[in-house]
Structure formats: structure tokens, C-alpha cells
Image (cartoon, rainbow, N blue to C red):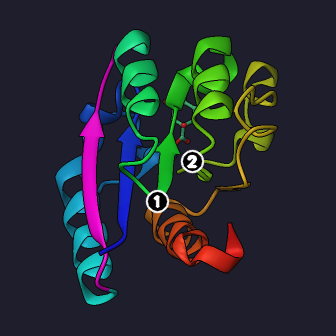
Amino acid sequence: MKKILLIHGPNLNLLGDRERDIYGTATLKEINDKLGAIAKKEGITLKAVQSNHEGEIVELIGGAKGKYDAILINPAAYTHTSVAIRDAISASAVPCVEVHLSNIYKREEFRHTSLIASVAKGQICGFGVMSYILGLEAAIYLTKEKNK
Ligand code: DQA
């Protein structure tokens, strides 16, 4: 059975309560449940983790090689700052999809740069919870050997 690791970065534990005008009303649990159900239908195991700590995310990615077939990540604020997460993705060689609820290119200038984008297979942003659903579809696509 193929396995996908879903990583949510800092402050995403606050979804549903945090800046609802930007991030919507769905909670992290609702997002994880929805994605879990989609993965299950596809015969994929989905492991979801949220962390507010950069080092913990680096270690999760570092441990993914040989264990997971793809990574789906919303690096949240670390998108714009973390060379360490970028390098971890690059080193792990596990195909990775980057997602964001909001359209980071329509927001403050500091959000226009993603340090993750150049090591991800692709990026989806701006569609709210649908970004995660589309991201999961992309990650499932990547688990199929020939698409890696
Ligand atoms: C975010 C966008 C980031 O700029 C921000 O720091 C987040 C969430 C998104 O999903 O839209 O925390 O990754």
C-alpha cells in the first residue's frame, strides 16, 4: 500500500479560528478527515502531522525516505524562511507537493517568495481547502512509479 505524509506547518493548528477571512472556517481536523477519506478510497495510507517547530519538520522529512511514497506539505510561514526545510526535501528525494490555502502571490510581498517551490514537484495555492484536495490528488499521482 502506498503511503503519503501530510505535514502542516506552524499555526495551522489554529485553522477554523485563525484569520477566517484568509484561511476559511475549516479546522485542521476537518481537513485531515476529508483527506484521509479521499486517500482511503484510493487505497492510500495518509499520515497527517502538524508542527510549530522547524527542526521537527526537518526530522519528519528526513525520516520519510523509504517510508513514504510522497509528501504533501503546507510549510505555512516556514515557506518563506526555511532553508533547512528546503534542504531536507531536496535531500530526502521523496516527491513533494507544496500547498497553501491562500494565494501567497496576492498577499504581502514577503509571502511572494517560496524557498520550497524549487524543490517541490509542484505548488498549489489559493483554493482554500481545495488546495489540499488538489495537492493530495497530485501526491497520489506521484506515488504511481512512472510519474515520480
Ligand atoms: C499559508 C500561507 C503562509 O504565508 C502563511 O504564513 C501561513 C499559511 C497558507 O496556507 O495560505 O501560515 O501557508
- In percent of the image, x 57 and y 35: which residue is there? 92
Contact, mark 2 vs mark 1 (Cβ under 8 Å): yes
Residue 16 visible: no
Name the amino acid, label 1: Asp
Image position of 93 (left or right of 43): right
Residue 81, by quadrant, is top right
State the separation of the CA atoms marked 2 and 1: 6 Å
- In percent of the image, x 26 and y 33: which residue is there? 14
Q: Where on the image, by quarter, is ligand 1?
A: top right
Residue 130 visible: yes
Name the amino acid, label 2: Val
Q: Position of residue 112 (x, y in %)?
A: 80, 31
Q: Which range is magenta?
A: 43-53
Residue 48 vertical position relative to residue 138 in the rendered view, above or below: above
Q: Position of residue 9 (x, y in %)?
A: 41, 30
Residue 52 lies in the magenta-colored region: yes
User: From this viewpoint, which residue is outermost toward the bottom?
Assistant: 41
Total numbered badges shown on the rendered structure: 2
Residue 111, by quadrant, is top right
Residue pointed to by mark 1: 69
Q: Position of residue 77 (x, y in %)?
A: 55, 22
Image position of 24 (left or right of 35): right
First in sequence, mark 2 or 1: give its number: 1
- In percent of the image, x 41 and y 40: which residue is there? 64
Q: Quadrant of the C terminus?
A: bottom right
Residue pointed to by mark 2: 94
Image position of 111 (left or right of 56): right
Residue 34 vertical position relative to residue 56 in the rendered view, above or below: below
- Classify 10 Å Cα crowding around label 1: few (below 14), some (14-19), many (20 and above): many
